[in-house]
Amino acid sequence: MPMLEEPATRYKPFQPTPFKERTWPDKQSKKAPIWLSTDLRDGNQSLANPMTNLQKMRFFRHLVQIGFKEIEVAYPAASETDFAFVRELVNTNEVPDDVWIQVLTPARADLIERTFEAVAGLKHVIIHMYNATSCLFREVVFNNNREETIKLATDHTALIRRLAEKYSKSHGTSFRYEYSPETFSQTETPYAVEVCEAVKKTWLAGKESVWADGRNEERIIFNLPATVEVATPNCFADQVEQFINGLTQREKCIISLHTHNDRGCAVAAAELGVLAGADRVEGTVLGNGERTGNVDLVTLGLNYYSQGYTPNLDFSDMFAIIDTVTECTGLPVHPRHPYAGDLVFTAFSGSHQDAIKKGLEAQKKREEAGDNFWSVPYLPIDPADVGCTYEAVIRVNSQSGKGGVAYIVKTALALDLPRRMQVSFYQIVQEKSEVTGKEMTVQDITSAFREAYNFGTGYNGRIVLKSFSMENQRASRSSSVLGTPEQSPARESRSLSRMTQLSLGEARAEASPDRNGQVNGNEDLPSVPRKITATVVVDDKQYKISGEGNGPLSSFLEALHGDLGIQLSVREYSEHSVGVGSDVKAATYIEVIPPNVDPKDKTKGGFWGVGVDADITASGLKAVVSAANRWLGDQKLNLE
Ligand SMILES: CC(=O)SCCNC(=O)CCNC(=O)[C@H](O)C(C)(C)COP(=O)(O)OP(=O)(O)OC[C@H]1O[C@@H](n2cnc3c(N)ncnc32)[C@H](O)[C@@H]1OP(=O)(O)O
Ligand SMILES: CC(C)C(=O)C(=O)O
Ligand SMILES: [Mg+2]
């Protein structure tokens, strides 16, 4: 059947009860509510294949590990399996002393009795009874009027009270009682109050303590379910506040919420319901449950966390939680699931990536200065807090930008590319990703980088630098940066396989800092005249070349020009250190231009290269070779 042109002929809008006294919109929730996990009951009853008791036990242990202190474990009267699971908890002593086991029963005497048999011997038990109270259920399901519905609830509450008194004496169990006016959000609120008042009166009229230690702890839990979510969350919050206002002896009641997600608003309804005065929330880990699910306690809990309030639940190992949930329920977790999905901390789009990259760098600096507050664009919490690495934060496809690509190069290769080189490499990545139309993995990007810049073992270009030696041309003179007297004529000979660390001053003699604190080339600075002699291989043939200049780079460029006819000059230079201590290396980035290119118009004609070496001179020369190879491409060289 197609969708109706006039849905009003089939569906009636929800009619909220007028409630002007509401105060919840002005409130803030600064403390997490009491949590109850109903994964093993409401979650389980909605599965095509309910969990085995082995799976239930695994899930139970994980719930305890996460920190739940109240866990609804079964509907014991439903089946032998459910009954046996509760008995297993008793017999194996699985339940920590501070955890309350909750079990659900309908308002039926035989099933209530069976429920008590199941929990006999546990230390702390919440008996949870429900009966639906809405007009639709009264008329269609139970054929009960209002009074009969109240009587159904109170008669069975009285039975539960009697059995609780009996079992607390005989088995040393402490009991609490939870009553759910099922379909609360579809029930006339004043009538829901009337039912609960009657239930409370019955429960509190009990003769003896239902606590094993004889304590007079009689707080009753009223659990208000949006059994089916039928209205906007503000309507639910109104109902909760109206219910609480109508209730007497508030101090003897715990108000609990149990929202379902039919309209996709279970989290919002629970949050607003807590603002409206509720103390407790029932739900499931990652939201499994009837139809569209119960409220997701991971989302709710981490919503508190992201505001700086402890959820009293530990979600730090989200991967383990996902494993338990998926393996026990057989249901997948959506990749966009808040806080838990595979993609929720991932940015593919360029502007998001750019902001995240800048944000993470700024965050690191703030943290180094002692400010730990998290403030990174697009990331509401630190992914590391829920056990995620930063690897998945930025992933690259055709929607991505230079910032994202540069982030991956930085995290995977420890290379912090200068801005204009980022733009240049981004074009290479963009072309590749448009050809495939698919995501570029970290491996794809690092391979593209290595190929483009002949970076790393096995990625040689047509020109390869084998070894070099430097010779100073003038008598003793101080290095302009370090101020160390140099011996003259000094000759250092280095093979590229094992180089000693040289002073930064050698390369910086040709360089000055740019606005990013990196060091840029400046051939005009006073420096020591140098002569370089280098062995290079070009197209598999070896050449010995030499040249003179103000420093190693200019000498080498001169040698390339004079001996090989490769005429290039440096337009931009920068460097940074990689690693720390004795493992520190220098990474050098150089942009070269051929003579026909305007050095001032930086939008055109440059070729970037990169070099990394423990020796800063060698890293600079490698960067020149890398850039020269990019310039060379597959042009023909006239060398005899
Ligand atoms: C919203 C919720 O999640 S409520 C919890 C729902 N969970 C479950 O139902 C899971 C476990 N349930 C079961 O295994 C079975 O339904 C049982 C064992 C409880 C009962 O099974 P059956 O006796 O075969 O009854 P059936 O499943 O058909 O239940 C419907 C009957 O229970 C009645 N009923 C429904 N809810 C309640 C209740 N809360 N209290 C008392 N009676 C109830 C219905 O009116 C109907 O009565 P009728 O047979 O006189 O018309
Ligand atoms: C038993 C009740 C609390 C329930 O699960 C619901 O109404 O959704
Ligand atoms: Mg439910």
Image (spheres, helix red, strand yellow):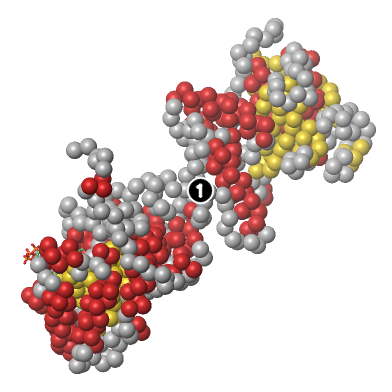
Q: Position of residue 477 (x, y in %)?
A: 92, 37
Q: Quadrant of residue 123?
A: bottom left
Left or right of 544? Residue 167 is: left
Q: Position of residue 289 (x, y in %)?
A: 25, 57
Query: Which residue is at 75% across, 30% downward?
Result: 572
Give the residue type at disc 1.
Tyr
Left or right of 407? Residue 118 is: left
Query: Which residue is at 75% across, 18% downward?
Result: 597
Residue that numbered label 1 is attached to: 390
Classify 322 as above or below 399.
below
Query: Which residue is at 24% across, 51% downward?
Result: 11
Classify 450 as above or below 596.
below
Q: Quadrant of residue 71?
A: bottom left
**Closer to us: 545 or 388:** 388
Task: Name the quadrant of the N terminus.
Answer: top left
For label 1, the crowd category at 10 Å Cα-Cα, with few meaning under 14, some 14 to 19 and many 20 or more, is some
Classify 153 as above or below 296.
below
Residue 168 shows in the view:
no
